[in-house]
Image (cartoon, rainbow, N blue to C red):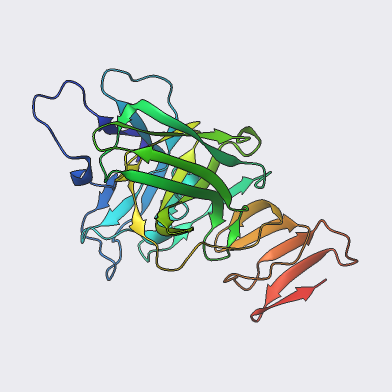
Amino acid sequence: MADNLFLFYDKEDRDGVQYTVADICEYDIQLRGVTTKTQMVQMLNLSQNYRYWVRSGSIGKMYLCGIALCGNDMLPMKEFNKYSYLLSQSSLIAPNGYIDKLGYIDNVRDIFITLYGLNPNVIWQYLDGEYYYKAHAIWDHGRQICNTVRDLGNCTLSYASNGLLFNIVNGDTCGRRTNFRFYRGKKDGNNIQYTHYVDVPICGTKHLYENGISICGYKWQKLTEGILSGNTNIKSISYKGNNIECRSTTCPSVGSWQDGDIVYNMGTGTNSLWIFINGRWIAK
């Protein structure tokens, strides 16, 4: 399955019938006959499949995001979706559910995102209020490879008025490929309570649009585990099947790593690398 572009229409100017953005399915591909409890019966080879945010009548530059997959039960194919920023370009899903991950990304610490502000190309479809945002790039959820969380600021929004525009900064050095996790909250007295999050896989886009229900079609979820903290000193990642090779100034301290994972030491220590064996890091 190759060279497909899935358009997400955030704001239709010319529809004769009003529709609700919340009713739009958040998945791009459904694997028929596959559920979270059954496996595929044949290989699925994906190449150059992306989602593209668009406003009716204004299709312009192809700023691409990753696709989202679900099974026949409409539940997410999490093992694919959490690496969608990489797998949307090229991947193989095997009958046993194994997903072949190959790819290299450099300069992972450079990219970040900013809140530009209100934008007329997207309509706010959620409750009125003043909302606060944080965000960071997460390259690997399980291993907790991520950037430092940044405060993006706040904005007051009203139903059926302008939504928000976010801009990606310093993304060229990594090909603007990552998963951005956004956190959204509101003030409770003097404190800000972040109650929702959304993961947005990007594959070259420079802009992201927030309508209150979703960012470019990726829907907000309730935040139950708090804001993720992780290994922020990793400079590059290279996937080789189930394993990963990284460059970092320090040995990883958190996350669920696999036996055979390797981290090359770019710091001041005397060892050249760390390898994960039998559940612990070994310096070599």
Q: Quadrant of residue 158?
A: top left
Foreground pick, 88 / 65 = 65
Q: Is 53 above or below relative to 143?
A: above
Q: Is residue 83 shown left or right of residue 54?
A: right
Q: Position of residue 279 (x, y in %)?
A: 64, 80
Viewport quadrant of the C terminus? bottom right
Q: Position of residue 131 (x, y in %)?
A: 40, 46
Q: Residue furthest left?
A: 17
Q: Position of residue 231 (x, y in %)?
A: 65, 62
Foreground pick, 191 / 165 = 191
Q: Quadrant of residue 159?
A: top left
- Residue at left 58%, top 53%? 149
Viewport quadrant of the N terminus? top left
Q: Residue furthest bottom?
A: 278
Q: Is 37 above or below relative to 83?
A: below
- Residue at left 30%, top 61%? 40
- Residue at left 79%, top 65%? 273
Q: Is 247 above or below relative to 19?
A: below
Q: Position of residue 82 (x, y in %)?
A: 45, 56
Q: Is residue 228 shown left or right of residue 35?
A: right
Q: Is 234 above or below relative to 215?
A: below
Foreground pick, 4 / 70 = 70
Foreground pick, 127 / 90 = 127
Q: From this viewpoint, is residue 87 visible?
A: no
Number of on-image labels: 0
Q: From this viewpoint, is residue 155 visible?
A: yes
